[in-house]
Amino acid sequence: MPIRLVLADDHPLVLDGLTLLFAADPEFEVAARCTDGEQAVAAAIRYRPDILVLDLRMPRKDGLAVIRELAGQHPGIPVVLLTAALNEDEVLEAVRLGVRGVVLKEMAPQLLVQCIRRVHAGGQWLERQTVSRALEKVLHREAGLQQVAALLTPREIELVKLTAAGLSNGAIAERLHITVGTVKVHLHRIYEKAKVKSRVALTLYAQEKGLV
């Protein structure tokens, strides 16, 4: 049985190229071609492909939105992301959502073929450099969060997040159902513990430790 594919990319040249690539190999069968995210969701549900080859940047629904919808309502369809660029946060979310393969468009077409074969066999194919950067970011964030948790109370951490989000003392007090005076006391203690002297410095501290 050939590997059944649904292809989704909003660029006609890319979509035509993918179709020709897989049509030339009897190991593959293209069940549907899609040019936007909503079409991709509908085709994945209708054809239940062995692999959904999905562009990350598409109109109407981007690739991650497609994956979220399928994961929530129709799980079990393996996805290979095909993208020109992928930042750390996107690759982390993709992996959390169960994406089995990530291939950059700058790579040779044969690598996409190899990726699909590996994913179909139950393996993974992730672009190493991007994934490595993403994992480093996660480890750094987790280490920062552990440091903060050892230094500040849960209430103080909540205040740091709200302050870093740009809320005034009055808005924080209203959100937490406390007085403005209590907010000021908390912030004074937080400044001392974190060794900062201003809201800007506290915001930078929150960003460095992965709180925002």
Image (cartoon, grey):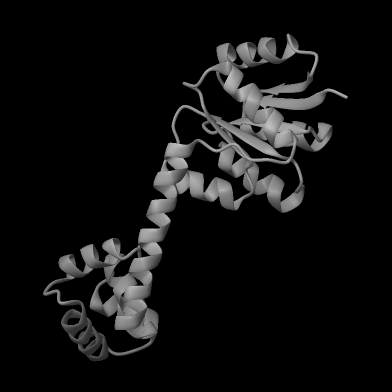
Q: Residue 25: percent from the left, percent from the top?
A: 75, 12
Quadrant assignment, res 207: bottom left
Q: Quadrant of the C terminus?
A: bottom left
Which of 33 and 101 lies nearest the eye of the viewer? 101
Which of 110 and 45 lies nearest the eye of the viewer? 110
Q: Quadrant of the N terminus?
A: top right
Q: Which residue: 43% across, 39% down?
A: 130
Quadrant assignment, res 14: top right
153 shown above or below 128: below
Q: Residue 170: percent from the left, percent from the top?
A: 26, 79
Q: Residue 2: percent from the left, percent from the top?
A: 83, 23
Q: Which residue: 48% across, 44% down?
A: 90
* Residue most extreme to the right: 1
85 shown above or below 166: above
Q: Residue 7: percent from the left, percent from the top?
A: 68, 24
Residue 90 shown left or right of residue 133 in the figure:
right
The answer to whether residue 104 shows anywhere in this view is: yes
The answer to whether residue 58 shows anywhere in this view is: no
212 shown above or below 77: below
Residue 174 shown left or right of residue 34 in the figure:
left
Q: Which residue: 63% across, 11% down?
A: 16
